[in-house]
Amino acid sequence: MKRFFLLLSEPFRRSIRNKLMLAMIMLAVLPVITVSALAAEKSRQSMEDEVIETNLSTIKWTGIYLGEQFSRLNSLIYSILLNEHLSENIMETENDSLSSQFTAQRNITDMFSSVLNSANTNVISAELYVRDSGKLFRFSSDGSEIRSPEEIPVPYKELFDEKQYFMIRNDPGKPGQFEFTRSVNRFENRQAVGGVTLGVRWTYLDQTLALLNTAPNQTVLLADKNGRILYKQGSVTPTLDAGNLINLPRDQPGYVHTRNAYIFYSSVDPSGLMLVKIIPANAINHSARSTMNYGFIVGSSSIVVAIIIAVYIAYRMSRPIVMLARSMQGLGPIVGDVEPVDIQLSGRIDEIGWLETHFVNMTGRIREHIKTEYNMKLEKKTAELKALQAQINPHFLQNTLQMVGSMIYDKKPKEVYKIIKSLSSMFRYVIREPEDMCSLRIEIGHLQHYMQIQKERYGSRLAYTLIADEELLECRIPKLTLQPIVENSFFHGLDTKLGDWRIDVEVRLESGEIVIRVRDNGVGISAVRLEEIRKELADRRGLQTKGSRIGLYNVVLRIRMHFGERYGIEVEQASGGGTVVTVRIPYVQEGRDEP
């Protein structure tokens, strides 16, 4: 068995194209088969629900109409019993006078003939049995008779013994007819004194039973309370016995689903009969078969199309891999420091296995090339950064030198020296500091020198505050982080603003991070421009500058390069006007490793 399985799977183990074709065919065919099967079952279920709902409604109304027909028969019997001369004529039949007997019999005959003529043509006979006298009066289209049977006739004896008011049973001697018998009771004590029987053809009910739309393979039954089948429509022999029919609920219409049939039932009031319709289970499947056949044709066509598409897609997708594998088979191992390998990492023997083998052989040398290239680019970027850090805004330098020249005439030498010292410290910080990282104390010192020059330049018009926790001053921060931000505040926010200027710098520890906020009361930033700045700061394009200045983009890049993507700069509008620039860096003290 194992050898047979290996032999069968060999074409798929050695070719990724065959694997992909098989996988694509399975992915394409299985959903189609599943959907087709579900659609067929859904169609059959819908047909079943429709048949059940339709037959429940139909058998309910058919039972109601049958009840109305039996009520009319009951009313016909009442019309006989309520005749005011019936009792007198029955008593006269006991008179010794032959003339009186003849007259009484003729009156009774005329009364029953009148009733039969006014009734439905399917009512073909009527009987009156008087218990006290033991006489039986029978009337039909064939004639009439009066006789005195030795025993109580069967329907009346069963009626009297079971103390029933009415009874429906088949006429034993006349197939196709039934007897509708009702007891005649004395008003005072409800004691049965006789009975009336109507002989009715079953065709009397056929028009109503036709509402059930009985198909050739279906059956309609009428059964009495004892489960005996009184009338049947349909050529199929029912599989129900008296026990099954007795156990059917009589309180409301319903149905029972057996393995072979659907049985719908409804009671017929006030006759006490049970109306039953039997539909074979295969009839519903046969009704849904045409729909299922169409679904099978569509599903089969879809499967064929899916297989063709799957094979085509698999072929197109695997073609580059197969071609690449064949090309790499001609490549020998790279000669050099990397040892060639002749194994498949995943144990595969197809084109992917070939690619793995040759890829491992090439990886070492490629890694060496990448490392060399990376070091070259890193050195280039470092040189560019150092050159950029060495630049000072020429406009700022020119203004500062002009301010120093004017101070020589107006200020004391001590004040002039103080400004020159600040400018010198700024140059020394930018040019002589070899490291890209420094303590926050040194960075703030550089910012203080810059602000001292600006305050001397703008005088009382410029207000500047710095708030920083002492314990945070030894934390590490990239050089030239704060001064470019403050410079942007002058250039973009305060330069065009009339009135007093204000810059506030605040350094705090929030949630384990150092947060530096630079706030100005300048002209602010429009919503459109603010959105552009935020998108540019979120970009990963690398080092960018604004002219010859070290811009926000450079600051963001260096913060992310040292601390990761979660840190950087946020720009927002300040409440009451102006701009707030927030710098977030981790809490890393001087001398400790970066996070």
Image: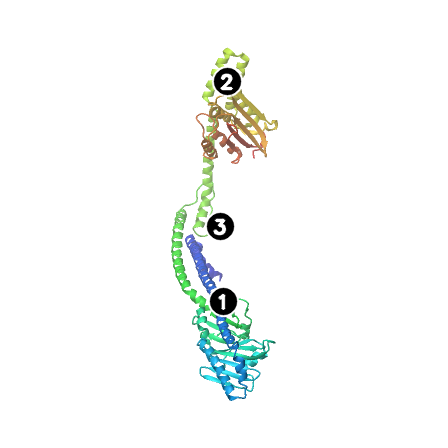
The span from disc 3 to disc 2 (Cα, nearest Å) is 72 Å
Q: Is residue 85 above or below residue 63?
A: below
Residue drawn at x 40%, y 54% as measured from the top left: 310
Reading the image, the residue beneath label 2 is 457
> Which mark is nearer the camera, 3 or 2?
2
Reading the image, the residue beneath label 3 is 346
10 Å crowding of disc 2: few (<14), some (14-19), many (20+):
some
* x and y, in percent, of residue 325 in the image: 41, 48
Task: Find numbered disc 1 in the image and state the secondary structure of the residue it sits on.
Answer: helix
Image side of residue 507 versus residue 364, left or right: right
Which badge, 1 or 3, is on the more N-terminal residue? 1
Q: Are marks 3 and 2 in contact (CB under 8 Å)?
A: no
Which badge, 2 or 1, is on the more N-terminal residue? 1
Task: Find numbered disc 3 in the image and state the secondary structure of the residue it sits on.
Answer: loop
Residue 365 lies in quadrant:
top left
Which badge, 3 or 2, is on the more N-terminal residue? 3
Pick the residue in front: 212 or 119. Answer: 119
Q: Quick check: can you spot residue 32?
A: yes
* x and y, in percent, of residue 403 in the image: 48, 16
10 Å crowding of disc 1: few (<14), some (14-19), many (20+):
many
Display colour scheme: rainbow
Residue 122 lies in quadrant:
bottom left
Image side of residue 591 versus residue 523, left or right: right
Looking at the rendered structure, the kind of residue marked 2 is Arg
Pick the residue in front: 541 or 76. Answer: 76
Looking at the rendered structure, the kind of residue marked 1 is Lys
Reading the image, the residue beneath label 1 is 60
Q: Are marks 1 and 3 in contact (CB under 8 Å)?
A: no
* x and y, in percent, of residue 492 in the image: 47, 25
